Image: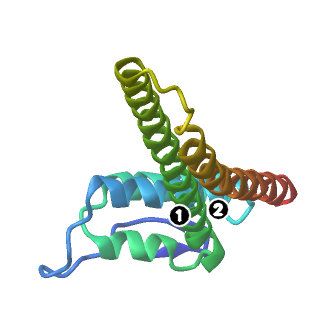
């Protein structure tokens, strides 16, 4: 790839025949990194436009690697960390929702059994209260820390993004 005084890309690199092909997701990722680099001031408008054109037409991963090679490493990894954090937060919230749903369903089942037995035997001791309370404490012990941790991470992420 030739450059004109280090600012503009003029031609596509010749990729070896055995070079792995670049998929749409890889091209999209390269475009995101280029956008971040432009937004952070690492690329001029002309450089960004030319690299964007090459990135959208890239057929091989080596072409994308060359486009991003001179950019700071943190630009290439910051989005990965943010995506990983977001996936972890979604998984944690899903775990809490599943736990709470199973808890609610089982609690309703216990109350239904209690009502059926109470009606059939005319014995109305409220035994479901003990497993419902015990398990409820467990659900709260799961939900509260997850919610607080996810919110704290989101606040730190917003603070970091507003500083950067």
Residue at 67% from the left image edge and 49% from the top image edge: 140
Residue at disc 2, secondary structure: helix
Left or right: 151 with respect to 23?
A: right
| Residue that mark 1 sits on | 84
Neighbor class of circle 1 (other Cα within 10 Å; few <14, some 14-19, many 20+) is few
Checking the image for residue 15, the label placed there is: none
Q: Name which quarter of the figure residue 58 lies in.
A: bottom left
Q: Which residue is mark 2?
A: 37
- The quarter of the displayed image where residue 98 is located: top left
The percent position of residue 123, horizontal first and vertical second, equals: 47, 27
Q: Position of residue 161 (x, y in %)?
A: 78, 55
Callout 2 crowding tier (Cα within 10 Å): few <14, some 14–19, many ≥20: some
Residue drawn 57% across the image and 33% down it: 126
Q: Is residue 71 above or below residue 144?
A: below
In this rendering, position of residue 13 left or right of residue 108: left
Q: Nearer the viewer, residue 52 or 31?
A: 31
- Give the answer, above or below, for where 78 lies relative to 44: below
Q: Is residue 31 above or below residue 74?
A: above
Residue 51, visible in the rendered structure: yes
């Amino acid at each position: 790839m030739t450059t004109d005084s280090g600012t503009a890309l003029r031609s596509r690199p010749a990729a070896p025949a055995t070079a792995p092909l670049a998929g749409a997701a890889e091209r999209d990722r390269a475009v995101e990194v280029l956008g971040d680099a432009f937004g952070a001031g690492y690329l001029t408008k002309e450089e960004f436009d030319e690299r964007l054109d090459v990135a959208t037409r890239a057929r091989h991963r080596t072409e994308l690697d060359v486009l991003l090679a001179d950019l700071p490493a943190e630009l290439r990894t910051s989005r990965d960390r943010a995506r990983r954090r977001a996936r972890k937060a979604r998984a944690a919230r899903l775990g809490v929702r599943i736990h709470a749903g199973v808890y609610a369903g089982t609690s309703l089942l216990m109350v239904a059994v209690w009502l059926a037995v109470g009606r059939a035997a005319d014995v109305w001791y409220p035994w479901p209260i003990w497993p419902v309370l015990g398990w409820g404490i467990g659900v709260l012990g799961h939900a509260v820390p997850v919610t607080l941790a996810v919110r704290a991470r989101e606040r730190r992420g917003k603070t970091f993004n507003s500083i950067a």
